[in-house]
Amino acid sequence: MCDFSLMLAKSRPAVVADRLVTKNFGLGTTGFCAMDDDSLAVCVLPGTEIAFSAPVETQELGHWLQVRRDTIDHTTAIFRQINKDNDRTHHDALEFPDGQVVLLTRLVESQVATVLQLPAQPKTDAEASEQRRVEVVA
């Protein structure tokens, strides 16, 4: 993680056993912050496995600007980046065991997650490319 709208936020990379919290950074996106510093975005690499303390809650604007909430019946996910070919949209997402992929920016604030495992070091150029962060062209 650190989606395009968090590029200017103070941040650090995630490490194994990090306890993270979902937070709306007020910059147009929700991401992970450090448990002990909610102003510090924690960037997660694609392929990182995380576990939430409870089933994951999401929200999005529905018809007539009403907020629609949903609960995903899983507590583990793998961090992914999607929409890499579109630099003007969110990329950070979670893939759940049932194959469902949800943008991180749709997560409800204050959910606690723990980093279980970081992705393996890439052995091929293709693996390295998959782990590379999306670069946003201004």
Image (cartoon, rainbow, N blue to C red):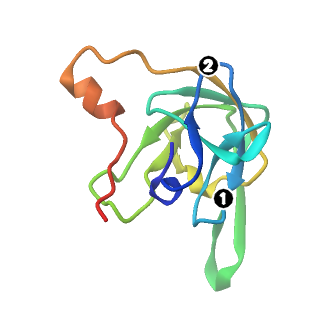
Q: Quadrant of residue 62?
A: bottom right
User: How far is disc 2 from disc 1 in space, using C-alphas?
Assistant: 23 Å
Secondary structure under tag 2 reads loop
Q: Does 52 sit above or below residue 29?
A: above
Q: Does 108 sit above or below residue 17?
A: below
Q: Which residue is mark 2?
A: 16
Q: Give how far across and how far down residue 123 sits, in percent.
A: 26, 14
Q: Residues within 10 Å of mark 2 (few under 14, many from 20)?
A: few
Tell me which residue sits at (33%, 56%) in the image.
136
91 displayed left or right of 122: right
Q: Does 6 sit above or below residue 56?
A: below
136 displayed left or right of 67: left
- Asked if one can make out residue 57 in the rendered structure from this viewpoint, the answer is no
- Identify the disc placed on residue 25: 1
Tell me which residue sits at (31%, 33%) in the image.
130
In the image, 124 versus 74, the foreground residue is 124
Tell me which residue sits at (72%, 61%) in the image.
69
In the image, 109 versus 33, the foreground residue is 33
- Asked if one can make out residue 97 in the rendered structure from this viewpoint, the answer is yes
Question: The disc labelled 2 sits on which kind of residue?
Answer: Val
Numbered marks: total: 2
Proximity of marks 2 and 1: CB atoms separated by less than 8 Å: no
Question: The disc labelled 1 sits on which kind of residue?
Answer: Phe
Q: Give how far across and how far down residue 98 sits, in percent.
A: 54, 35
Secondary structure under tag 1 reads loop
90 displayed left or right of 109: left
129 displayed left or right of 104: left
Name the residue furthest bottom. 64
In the image, 51 versus 72, the foreground residue is 51
